[in-house]
Image: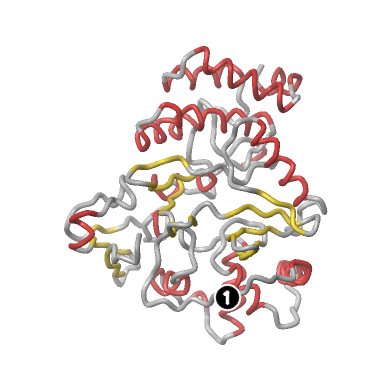
C-alpha cells in the first residue's frame, strides 16, 4: 500500500470500533473490506459480534491461539495486564509486524531483522510456554519472531536466504513428525494442482512456508474469508457453497472458482476438517481481488469430528453433495469430473473417495 494512510480508527466507551477512510484514499484507493467497509466517506461502525466490536479485516491482524498466548505472556513479564488492553491498544502492539499490508500507528511493535534462528532452541521454549513452565528468558525472543502470528500451533516469522518464511513448531497434542507430515502434504497438494507458496522442511522437522503476503514490490493486502464476511472462525460458520460464491463475487473469474472447488475436494480427500473461515484468504493484487495461495493443508479434526466448513450443508459429505455444489456455482460437468478424478488418482485414495463421497 506504499506507506499511504488508509484511514483512522477510534473506539467508543462501549468498546465498538469506528473507522473512516482518509480523503486521499477515497480518491484513488480501494475498499480494504468490500462487504463491511465500502469505499465511501463518513464514519463506519463495527458490530459487537463476532469480533468483540472489531472489524473483521482488522481482527485478521491480531494474533489468535499461540500468538495470543505469547503476547499475554510477554506483557505479563513486562508488568502489563493484557486483559485491560482494548482493541486499538492491541493493534498498536502489532504495528508494522502483522500479516498482510495493513500497519497501525502508533507503532508499538517489537521485531527483529536477524536472519539466523536457532529453531531447536525456539521449539524448546515454545513447548515450555505451552506447558506453562518457566522459560529461560526467551519469551522476548519468541515474541519478536512470532508475536503477531495466528493459528494454534507455535510459529515464528523468519528471514532466511533473503526470503521471509513462516516456520511452525509442534503443539502439545501434535505427533512428533507433524512438520514432516505437513511438508509432505504440501508436496501432494502441489501435485494435485493446488497453488501454494514455496515450502521447505527446516532441520528435518520444522515445516516452513514462504510468506505470500510479501513480494519484491512490497506487502500485499490480504484478508481471510472470516474477515471478509465477519464470520466466526472458531465455530462452523461457512459452507463451501458460500466460499465458491464469494470467490466468484470478488474475483469475477471462474478459473479461480474452479481453484476453490479443487481445494475443497482436496480437503475432503485428505480429511482436512479444520477448514475454518480463516483458512481461506483473498488478496488485492494489481487492482483486483485474487484467491490467495492455499495453506494449512494436512489431515486434521474439525468441529465435533466433521468439516468445520460444511459441504452442501453436510459435515460428512457425499459425492452427491460435491456435485451439487459444482452445479450450483456453474462448473461444467467436464471440469468437475476432471478435478475429482485427477485428485482421487493423485491422492491414491479411490477407496477413501467411495467411503467419503459415496
For residue 111, above or below residue 247: below
**What scheme was used to colour the molecule?**
secondary structure
The residue indicated by pointer 1 is 112
On the rendered image, what quadrant is the N terminus found in? bottom left
Residue 344 at x, y = what percent? 68, 22
Position of 80 with respect to 106 (left or right) is right
Residue 129 point in image, percent of width and height: 71, 71
Which residue is pictured at 49% across the width and 57% down the height? 214
Residue 16 in the figure: left or right of residue 82: left
Badge 1 marks a residue whose secondary structure is loop
Taking depth in this image into account, of 28 and 227 the one nearest to the observer is 28
* The C terminus, quarter of image: top right
Task: Name the side, left or right, on which 135 lies relative to 289.
Answer: right
- List x then y, in percent, for residue 112: 57, 75
Q: Position of residue 113 (x, y in %)?
A: 57, 74
Whether 202 is drawn above or below 125: the answer is: above
Which of the 4 image quadrants contains residue 158? bottom right
In the foreground, 289 or 90: 289
Q: How many marks?
A: 1
Residue at the extreme top of the image, as rendered: 333
Residue 10 placement: quadrant: bottom left
**Tag 1: Cα neighbours inside 10 Å, few (<14), some, or many (≥20)?**
few
- Write the residue at 58% across / 65% down: 67
Residue under the point 23% across and 60% down? 21
Q: Residue at x 56, y 42 (%)?
A: 294
Say which quarter of the image contains residue 173.
bottom right
Amino acid at each position: 500500500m506504499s506507506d499511504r494512510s488508509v484511514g483512522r480508527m477510534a473506539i467508543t466507551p462501549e468498546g465498538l470500533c469506528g473507522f473512516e477512510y482518509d480523503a486521499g484514499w477515497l480518491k484513488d484507493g480501494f475498499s480494504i473490506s468490500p462487504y463491511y467497509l465500502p469505499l465511501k466517506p463518513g464514519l463506519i461502525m463495527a458490530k459487537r459480534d463476532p469480533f468483540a466490536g472489531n472489524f473483521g479485516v482488522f481482527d485478521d491482524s491480531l494474533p489468535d491461539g499461540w500468538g495470543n498466548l505469547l503476547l499475554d505472556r510477554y506483557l505479563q513479564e513486562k508488568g502489563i495486564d493484557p486483559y485491560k488492553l482494548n482493541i486499538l491498544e492491541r493493534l498498536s502492539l502489532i504495528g508494522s509486524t502483522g500479516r498482510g499490508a495493513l500497519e497501525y500507528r502508533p507503532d508499538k511493535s517489537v521485531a527483529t531483522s536477524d536472519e539466523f534462528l536457532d529453531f531447536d532452541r525456539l521449539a524448546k521454549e515454545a513447548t515450555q510456554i505451552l506447558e506453562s513452565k518457566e522459560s529461560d528468558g526467551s519469551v522476548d525472543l519468541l515474541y519478536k519472531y512470532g508475536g503477531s502470528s495466528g493459528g494454534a500451533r507455535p510459529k515464528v516469522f523468519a528471514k532466511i536466504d533473503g526470503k521471509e518464511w513462516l516456520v511452525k513448531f509442534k503443539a502439545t497434542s501434535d505427533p512428533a513428525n507433524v512438520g514432516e507430515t505437513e511438508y509432505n502434504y504440501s508436496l501432494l497438494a502441489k501435485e494435485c494442482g493446488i497453488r501454494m507458496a514455496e515450502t521447505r522442511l527446516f532441520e528435518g522437522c520444522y515445516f516452513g512456508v514462504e510468506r505470500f503476503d510479501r513480494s519484491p514490490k512490497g506487502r500485499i493486502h490480504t484478508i481471510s474469508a472470516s474477515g471478509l464476511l465477519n464470520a466466526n472462525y472458531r465455530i462452523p460458520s461457512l459452507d463451501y457453497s458460500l466460499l465458491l460464491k464469494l470467490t466468484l463475487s470478488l474475483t469475477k473469474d471462474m478459473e479461480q472458482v474452479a481453484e476453490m472447488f479443487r481445494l475443497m475436494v482436496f480437503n475432503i480427500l485428505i480429511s482436512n476438517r479444520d477448514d475454518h473461515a480463516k483458512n481461506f484468504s483473498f488478496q488485492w493484487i494489481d487492482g483486483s481481488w485474487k484467491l490467495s495461495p492455499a495453506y494449512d493443508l494436512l489431515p486434521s479434526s474439525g468441529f465435533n469430528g466433521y468439516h468445520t466448513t460444511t459441504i452442501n450443508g453436510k459435515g460428512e459429505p457425499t459425492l452427491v453433495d460435491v456435485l451439487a455444489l459444482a452445479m450450483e456455482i456453474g462448473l461444467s460437468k467436464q471440469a468437475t469430473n476432471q478435478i475429482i478424478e485427477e485428485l482421487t488418482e493423485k491422492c491414491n485414495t479411490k477407496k477413501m473417495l467411495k467411503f467419503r463421497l459415496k
